[in-house]
Structure formats: C-alpha cells, structure tokens
Image (cartoon, coloured by chain):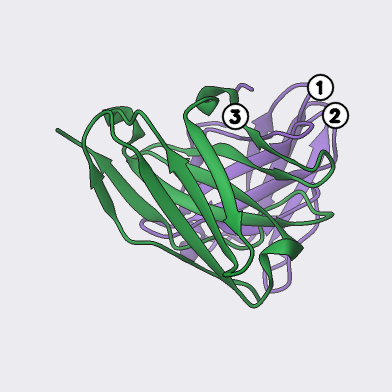
Chain colours: A purple, B green
Amino acid sequence: QSALTQPRSVSGSPGQSVTISCTGTSSDVGGYNYVSWYQQHPGKAPKLMIYDVSKRPSGVPDRFSGSKSGNTASLTISGLQAEDEADYYCCSYAGSYMVFGGGTKLTVL
Amino acid sequence: QVQLVQSGAEVKKPGASVKVSCKVSGYTLTELSMHWVRQAPGKGLEWMGGFDPEDGETIYAQKFQGRVTMTEDTSTDTAYMELSSLRSEDTAVYYCAPRWGGSYQFDYWGQGTLVTVSS
C-alpha cells in the first residue's frame, strides 16, 4: 500500500495547459480503471474533479480531463485560470483498498 | 445530494483515544460505504479505511491496523472513526467520505475534524 507518485509541483500561465502525472503499479492504477482526481484549496475539503479515469462529475468544467496509460494516470487542465491554483491528488482503487498520490501543487503564474 | 456533518475539533494527550463522528443526511448510511481519510498539517491525503461492499466488511489500511475502528449507527445515520494509542504524528484533519455501492470515488466529503495530539 505505497502512495502513488505525483510531481510535487507544476506551473503554467493563464490560458496554457498543464498535465499532472500519477504513477502507481499493476496492483492499483494499472490494474483498474478506477482512478479519481481531487482538487483542494487551502483550508477546504477535497473536491472530486475526475472519476473512473476520465469521467467528469456534473459541474466540473470540461477544461479538466483525465487519461491513463499502463501504470500512469494523468490529469490535464487546459485554458488555465487563476482559480485552478490548488493542490491536486490522484486516488486509485487497489482491490478493497484505496491509495492516494502525494499531491501536486499547481501554481498559476 | 448527500450532506456530511462531522463532530468538532478535539485535543488529546498521547496515548489517549479519539472518536470522530460523521452525520449523514440526504441519504441513509445503508446506501453508502463510508470511508475515512486524514491529512496531517501541510501533508497529503491518506486513506485510513472504509466499508467494502464487495467483501461486506470494513477494510483498514495496514498502517492503522489494530489502532482504528470504524463503526456505524444506522438508526441515526451516523458513522464513527475511533483511533487509539494516539501519538503526535496523528495530529491531522480527519475527513469522512462515502462511496456509493458501485462506485470507486469520493463524490462528497465531510467538512473535516481537526484532532490535535499534544502533551
């Protein structure tokens, strides 16, 4: 039950696109299509942004998209906006268990 | 829409236990599989455990095995997480976050409960 690996930080200018990776193993990310992504602003509870690798909950802008290849999942945010600046966490089902990534701080320059 | 209201902040001494509650409304607890996630100050999210409907039992992360107990009172739609033998490293915000039966994500989160362990 090791944490998934995410870059500690990424940055981009308004209007640009950024991609956050999330690397696991064949026992979690690679073994199931149950990767979810969460956005967390300081002092707030996490918010679901993507589930089942690439599905968007109602109300989440289509600027947010998810994908997966092998043991690595990715979250892409296009058309960056100031309010996208936050921490992002991936999470994967791992056969009865759930495992989170270490989190990535997104800075909008 | 589900609403999750957690109990208030706690301050505990090392070695003590803490019990955090999570009151569900909008759905009944039996329709959900409740999980608990914690976040130490300045750190990331950490899954502690939750009910697995496929196995029909509560699964705990290895790290917390023997120290954590998750229970539910379906008469009041309230879930509980009790953590024992507290140490300073357990200082964190504890969140309840349910999964629906056939889902594998956390659509909703409680507001969080800060537990501070200090002598």
User: Residue B20 or A39: which is nearer the viewer?
Assistant: B20
Assign a secondary structure to mark 3. Answer: loop
User: Residue B8 or A68: which is nearer the viewer?
Assistant: B8
Q: Kindly identify the residue that appears in the image at 79 percent across and 43 percent down.
A: B56
Q: Tell me whether marks 3 and 1 sit on the same chain.
A: no
> What residue did someone put label 2 on?
A31
Is residue B22 placed above or below A73 in the rendered structure? Answer: below
Q: Are marks 2 and 1 in contact (CB under 8 Å)?
A: yes
Residue B61 has which mark?
A: 3
> Extreme front residue here?
B75
Query: With B13 as the anchor, is B54 left or right in this view?
Result: right
Residue A100 in the image: x percent, y percent?
Answer: 60, 36
Q: Which image quadrant is residue B118 in?
A: top left
Q: Kindly identify the residue that appears in the image at 33 percent across and 31 percent down.
A: B86
> Which amino acid type is shown beneath numbered disc 1?
Ser
Assign a secondary structure to mark 1. Answer: loop
User: Residue A13 or A20: which is nearer the viewer?
Assistant: A20
Q: Kindly identify the residue that appears in the image at 46 percent across and 38 percent down.
A: B44
Residue A74 in the image: x percent, y percent?
Answer: 71, 40
Query: Badge 3: few (under 14), some or many (20 or more) residues near its Cα, within 10 Å?
Result: some
The CA distance from mark 2 to mark 1 is 5 Å
Assign a secondary structure to mark 2. Answer: loop
Disc 2 or 1, which lies upstream in sequence? 1
Q: Are marks 3 and 2 in contact (CB under 8 Å)?
A: no
Which quarter of the image is occupied by the N terminus of chain B? bottom right
> Which amino acid type is shown beneath numbered disc 3?
Ala
The CA distance from mark 3 to mark 2 is 19 Å
> What residue did someone put label 1 on?
A26
